[in-house]
Image (tube, rainbow, N blue to C red):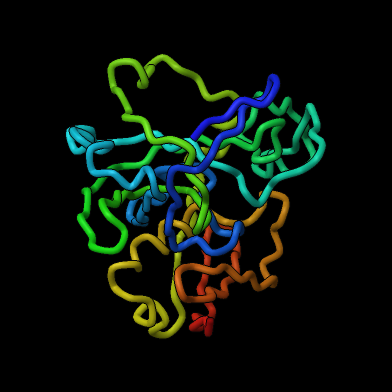
Amino acid sequence: MVLTMENELIIRPIAHIHADFKEKFGIPRQSGRAPSVQAKIVFTPPYRNAEALREIEGFSHLWLIFDFSKAHKESWSPTVRPPRLGGNKRVGVFASRSPFRPNPLGLSCVKLLRVEHTKDEGDVLIVSGADLLDGTPIFDVKPYLPLSDCQIEATGGYSEEGENHRLNVVFLDDLQGVIPSEKQAGLVECLADDPRPSYQDDATRVYGMRFADFEIKFTVDGDTLTVQDVLKVQE
């Protein structure tokens, strides 16, 4: 539902995403960086209508327009400090994908795996490669169109620095077996993407990352990330 008040636009969520990312730390820095991670998009009434999804399964990928719901602020800054640039160099907010924007809108491209028909939640979308926090409000879903959305000559500016940076992930003992098998590949992809801010490089520091129902404790030494412990989170 969209309402106009004077010269402002009020947008209501049409859906929410259910994902394994329970905290900001550890979420891949862009969509598609952890392609094995699956998520579920559940529509809210009155948008829980199967007709609204007619023909959607003909598209392999979707655009999600979402709310940076944990980054709302009363004011905004014209410049931001991207973590991948060391946290000190500033760039223009419109030259970034920072969540701290005049309007906290995000854009994410995900792969559509299937439409599931459920009794309690209606038709839901099962997607992979999302980079959204669990519970994030979705404002719109649009099909990805290869003909117009893929520009092979495009350049990525400063985002290309360290684009291929990946860590080797090692689990102590049999810790990987604690994670359900269907979630192991996605977790490894998230860890290999290096969740740390680029300005943190302390081989002795133990980091904690929430993934699904687990707290992952790890250290990073050079290009190797070692999972030190996996703890079941008690809700």
Residue 103 appears left or right of 214: right
Relative image position of residue 203 (x, y in whole percent): 67, 67
Q: Is residue 99 left or right of residue 46?
A: right
Q: Residue 199, position in %: x, y?
A: 72, 50
User: 5 or 111: which is nearer to us?
Assistant: 5
Residue placed most toward the observer, 105 or 14: 14
Query: What residue is drawn where x is 53% and y is 40%?
Result: 12
* x 61%, y 32%: residue: 10
x, y percentage for residue 113? 24, 48
- Name above or below for residue 181 compared with residue 133: below
Q: Nearer the viewer, residue 61 or 34?
A: 61
Q: Residue at x 29, y 22 (%)?
A: 146
Q: Is residue 60 above or below residue 200?
A: above
x and y percent of residue 65 in the render? 48, 35
Choose top left, top right, bottom left or bottom right for residue 5: top right
Q: Height in image: 145 above or below 111?
A: above
What residue is rendered at 23% in x and 33% in y?
59
Please name whichever residue, 28 or 50, is drawn nearer the observer in this view of the structure.
50
